[in-house]
Image (spheres, grey):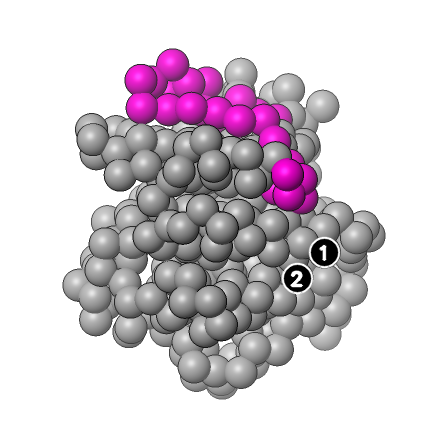
Amino acid sequence: MKVLVTGGCGFIGSNFVKYVLENFKNDKIVNVDKKTYAGGGNNVEHMGLDAHPNYIFYNADICDRKKMEEIFEKERPEIVVNFAAESHVDRSITHPEQFVMSNVFGVFNLLEAARKTGIKLFVQISTDEVYGSLSNNSPSSKESDLLKPRSPYSASKAAAEHLAMSYFHTYNLPVIVTRSSNNYGPYQFPEKLIPLFATNLIDGKKVPLMYSKENPGLNVRDWLHVEDNCAAIWHIIQKGKYGETYNIAGNHEKTNIEITKSILSSMGLGEEMIEFVPHRLGHDFRYSISDEKLRGLGFEKKHGDFEKALKDTIIWYKKNENWWRPLKK
Ligand SMILES: NC(=O)c1ccc[n+]([C@@H]2O[C@H](COP(=O)([O-])OP(=O)(O)OC[C@H]3O[C@@H](n4cnc5c(N)ncnc54)[C@H](O)[C@@H]3O)[C@@H](O)[C@H]2O)c1
């Protein structure tokens, strides 16, 4: 199979490239990435996969329709997995425009290119954030729930999903959407909570925890190991049904203060290393998704022990300073 991956230089995309190239010898990857700041870590090179015979890279912007059509025409991919996006919520609050461009207009270009060339499957990678903010008592979100995104990031991702599904219903383009929880693991840009905190602490710096008297770090996120996300996406490519959406949960819901304490204790440090900072604007309280539908496809995760996987992730950042240090500058 020839799989065109967009955003394959970023965190999840590069882990997906690795997952496919290392596990499936007959499958080819075409990686299309603009190499924004988030794709600037040379992840695929650091993984030693850039010269793999089944790997091709195009440094291109998904907002460039002509270029996308040229690449699709030349490569004729069977599967498209769209990871490319602006992905950092805080940046979407200060600079929303690029989120609309890449996360909505870029997706439109890919859908058009896919429709013109003809493909077997278009997978739109989305997020649990499209469900909006839950309370502690709310049941976990199901795929059929109403979307209530509340940040420019999550709103742009919800728009992209709707657009992708409209191509399924209108043009019979085979589309599947995945919505995953917060990912963690190797090669995550050190602006996101776990790598930011781990790399700050390696450097003896404090970690910024969003905090107020009314809400002392109680926001809840569900944590999913990136390898489990990649395996789940691959499983869905094999077994999922066109026109369907699948949640990919970690089933490890933690408050931000809990995860901060876990990181501190696994590095032998105390709470004096926490710096309290104000909550982000419109800070969603809790995300929680049910993965019953995915389990119905027979998928099982590998990383069941969260505390162990978190420790291993921190060890990875300790051992790979050469990867993250240039990105932190
Ligand atoms: N990280 C998470 O916890 C998480 C959770 C759920 C869903 N997602 C979704 O998964 C996908 C990947 O997330 P990530 O954390 O790997 O993101 P990331 O920010 O690490 O990587 C994004 C990649 O997309 C590329 N890109 C951005 N705009 C582009 C454009 N216009 N043209 C071509 N390439 C472009 C960047 O260069 C980068 O390599 C995103 O769609 C995100 O919304 C992420």
In this orientation, does residue 201 appear? no
Residue name at image x 26 percent, y 33 percent:
27
Pointer 2 local density, CA inside 10 Å: few below 14, some 14–19, many at least 20: many
Q: Is residue 29 magenta?
A: no
Quarter of the image for residue 199 reads top right
- The first of marks 1 and 2 along the sequence is 1
* Mark 2 element type: helix
Q: Which mark is residue 156?
A: 2
Q: Relative to residue 84, is residue 280 drawn left or right? A: right
**Residue depicted at 37% across the width and 70% down the height:** 244
Q: Mark 1 near mark 2, Cβ–Cβ under 8 Å? A: yes
Q: Quadrant of residue 310?
A: top left
Residue at horizontal 53 percent and vertical 16 percent from the top:
322
- Say if 151 sits above or below 31 in the image: below
Q: Residue furthest left?
A: 298
Position of 198 relative to 102 (above/below)? above
Q: Position of residue 126 (x, y in %)?
A: 50, 59
Using the image as rendered, state which of residue 323 and residue 79 is in the foreground: 79
Q: Which residues are magenta?
A: 40-66
What's under tag 1, amino acid-wise?
Answer: Val
Q: Position of residue 288 (x, y in %)?
A: 46, 71
**234 w.r.t. 44: above or below:** below
Residue linked to disc 1: 100
Q: Exactly how many numbered labels are in the figure?
A: 2
Badge number at residue 203: none
Q: Position of residue 137 (x, y in %)?
A: 49, 85
Q: Nearer the viewer, residue 185 or 310?
A: 185
* Left or right relative to 44: residue 304: left
- Residue 142 falls left or right of residue 129: left
